Amino acid sequence: RRAGDHFGSDVGIVPHYGIAVVGAARADARTAYGMTPSNYPHYEPNRGVSIPLDKAYAGWARQDNTRALAGSAARMRWRAQEMYGTDADGREFEAAGAVYVFRRADTMFDETTTDKWAPTELYKIIPPESSARDYYGHAVAMDELTLFAGAYGDDGMSLNGGAAYQYDLRAAADVVRFEAAEFYALEGTDSFALVRVLRDQLFEDSFLTVAYATSDLTAKGVDVVKFSECYGVAIAIREGCGDYLQTAGVLTFTPGVTSLTFPVYIMDDWCLERYQEYIQVTLSIPGSGLLLGEDAIAKVRLDDDDFLKTECTHSFL
C-alpha cells in the first residue's frame, strides 16, 4: 500500500468466517510484482521489461542472501527493471482501485493471557481490466462469502458509467494455497512438473473451484499446437520449441478432498541451458484476474540435463 491509496474507503466483514474486505479506491493498478503494468499497444510502445526474461536472471529467483525459496519472482523482475532502466507509463493506471482480503488468524495468547486475534492479509484483488480513475473498491459489501465491489468510474459502457464486480471468496475462507513456493522438473527424466494445491482440512465439507495459470519468467511457453508439433519430431532436432506447454484451467475440490494437482508439461530437447529456467504459476477466482498474495503464487523450476550438448538458437518462430 502506498500514499494516497485511500485504504479503508469501505469495509465489509463476515464475523463467523473471520473475513474482512477493505477497499482502496485510489490505489494505482499494479502487477503481481508491484510494478506498473504495460499499456502497450494502446498508447505507446512497451518500455517495460520484456518477457521471457534473460535466463541470466535465474540467480534472482530466490530470496536475498539466504537463498530461501520464494513463490513470487518479484526480485527477478525488479532486477531486470533495474538493468533495463525503464518502466511503463503509470498515468493510465492512476486511482484504478483495489480490494484487500484479510482473514483472522487463530487465537494466540501472550504472557498476560490476553487473547489476540491477529488479522492476516490473504489477497489483493484487482479486476482483469482496470484503467485510470475507475475507483474500484470505493464500495464493498459481503453476503456470506460473496463479495460485491463497485467501481463508479469505470468507462466500460460509457464515460464514468460505472461497474460492479461479484466474487466468490470461498478460496479465502478455505485457505487455498500452493503446497510449496517452488516446484521442479528434471528435463530428460520428468515429462511434467506436478503442482499441488491445498485447502484447509477444517473446510473440507464443501465444493470449491479455483483457477490456475502459468506465465513466462525465464522459461518460454508455447501453445498446444506448437508443443504437439515438436513432440512429433526427434529430440535431436527440437530447436525453437519453447520450454513448456502454456497451461490454464480450474480445480474443483469436492467434499472430503483437501489436495489437488495439475501438470505443467515440459519440453525435452538437446539444448544446453546455462541457467535454471523458471515458470510462474498463479491461482485466481474463476473469471477474475490473479489473486495477489503469497499463498496464490509459486514458481516451477526446470532443471537441464544436457551438460554435454551445445546451446541452441532459441528461435520461437
Image (spheres, grey):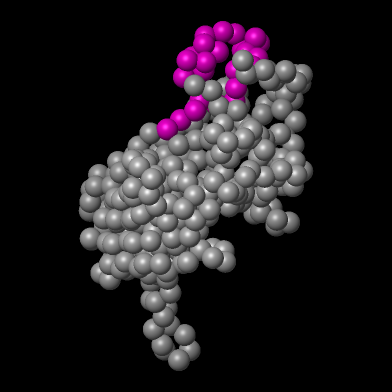
Q: Report whether 80 appears left or right of 51.
A: right
- Left or right of 213? Residue 238 is right
Q: Can you say which quadrant of the picture contains the N terminus?
A: bottom right
- In this view, the residue in front, 203 or 157, is 157
Corner quadrant of residue 272: top right
Q: Is residue 246 above or below residue 92?
A: above
Q: Position of residue 173 (x, y in %)?
A: 32, 59
In this view, which residue lies farthest toward the bottom? 112
Q: Residue furthest front?
A: 159
In the image, residue 99 sits, relative to residue 278, either above or below, namely below
Residue at image x 52%, y 15%? 226
Q: Image quadrant for the C terminus?
A: top right
Q: How many marks?
A: 0
On the image, the x and y values in percent for residue 263 come to 45, 32
In the picture, measured across the screen, residue 85 lies left or right of residue 172, that is right
Residue 254 in view in this figure: yes
Percent of width and height locating residue 68: 64, 54
The location of residue 206, given as percent across then percent down, is 23, 51
Identify the image quadrant of residue 159: top left
Magenta residues (range)? 224-248
Residue drawn at x 25%, y 44% is: 254
Foreground of the two, 66 or 291:
291
Judging depth in this view, the residue of 204 and 277 nearest the camera is: 277
- Residue 123 belongs to magenta span: no
